[in-house]
Amino acid sequence: MNAPHAAAISAAADGRVDPWRVNADLHCHSYMSDGMLAPAALVRRAHANGVQIHALTDHDEVGGIAEAAAEAARCGMQFVAGVEVSVTWGGETIHVVGLRVDAAHEGLISGLSRTRAGRDSRAREMAEDLERAGVPGAYEGALRYVGNPALISRTHFARHIVEQGVCADVGEVFQRFLVEGKPGFVPHRWARLSEAIEWIREAGGIAVLAHPGRYRLGDTGLWALMSEFRDAGGEGIEVLSSSHTPDQYRQFARHAREFGFRASRGSDFHAPGESRVELGQLPQLPDDVVPVWHDWPELAALAERA
Ligand code: AMP
Ligand code: MN
Ligand code: MN
Ligand code: MN
């Protein structure tokens, strides 16, 4: 286990805990989307790794939340319901994480269901294109990794391509296949930025811009995205993400201050041995940003238990 969070939080004399020292991991995936673990197994792994506030954020899906929440309660770990919504903005795919959402909210559920529609036909087109590129049987192969038939994704194809020995790992697949200009890429229209934020907010949640360092937008495009995200009601930004370099931690901490965003921390864990960063093992947030959880009841609950 990593050292930075080995020393769990303790309450100060006034009963408050230091939000910066809390091990919050607010971005990960179960097999309800493109992760490999069951929601309960993921929660147990987070707890074993020292996570104190945990969120499950499956792509376009909240079907794993009830199982995860029940397991977190058994473990005595603070849990918040989350989701990662796929958005098309300026021709790019952008991800928006919703945190502390009501997973039973009808508007959210129907919006996510509309966003998921079309994944299967996209997958069949991806498989046809891969077949032309010399990777046969990819639809059936990808399906073997799918836990939720409504959510076949590029990750499932990537695992199949690795299994076939065509690439050494998932990272190599996303260099040679499945991205714009490479075999297996099929453009898709996801939700609009404004509607994703609206579903999250209507479900009582807070919208967080996921892994902003990953988008190929250039400085001007990134600025435009963050401005529009804020104007549409977005309140947070992932400063710490497994997709970010330490330089990007600093860059997005600065942008968080400039735009008045709260800062989030998420490993984006998908599977043991596949994900670059384990659950709960990113560094601490810098002290010049405000943690997205700083005023959450889950933080107060930690103080009561400390
Ligand atoms: P989809 O929603 O079907 O377009 O699939 C998107 C998923 O592919 C992301 O959530 C990641 O899990 C995965 N992915 C995209 N790019 C990469 C990459 N460069 N390396 C590893 N996984 C990636
Ligand atoms: Mn994913
Ligand atoms: Mn993402
Ligand atoms: Mn993710």
Image (cartoon, rainbow, N blue to C red):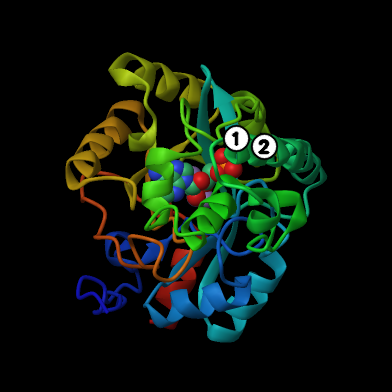
Q: Secondary structure at mark 2?
A: helix
Q: Quadrant of the C terminus?
A: bottom left
- Mark 2–mark 1 contact, CB under 8 Å? yes
Q: Is residue 130 visible?
A: yes
Percent x, y of residue 49: 37, 78
Which residue is depicted at the point 46% across and 67% down? 53
Q: CA distance from mark 2 to mark 1?
A: 6 Å
- Badge number at residue 132: 1
Percent x, y of residue 62: 69, 55
- Under mark 2, the amino acid is Glu
Which residue is depicted at the point 21% across and 51% down? 287
Q: Nearer the viewer, residue 102 or 66?
A: 66
When asked about the image quadrant of residue 249, the answer is top left
Would you call the spot at circle 1 few (<14 residues within 10 Å), some (14-19), or many (20 or more)? few
Vertically, is 176 above or below 143?
Answer: above
Which residue is depicted at the point 53% across and 19% down? 91
- Under mark 1, the amino acid is Arg
Vertically, is 40 above or below 89?
Answer: below
- Badge number at residue 155: none
- Label 2, on which residue? 128
Would you call the spot at circle 2 few (<14 residues within 10 Å), some (14-19), or many (20 or more)? some
Vertically, is 204 above or below 40?
Answer: above
Q: Quadrant of the N terminus?
A: bottom left
For this view, does 172 lie left or right of residue 21?
Answer: right
Percent x, y of residue 185: 55, 32
For this view, does 180 lie left or right of residue 73?
Answer: left
For this view, does 1 lie left or right of residue 178?
Answer: left
When asked about the image quadrant of residue 169, the answer is bottom left
Q: Is residue 264 visible?
A: no
When asked about the image quadrant of residue 267, the answer is bottom left
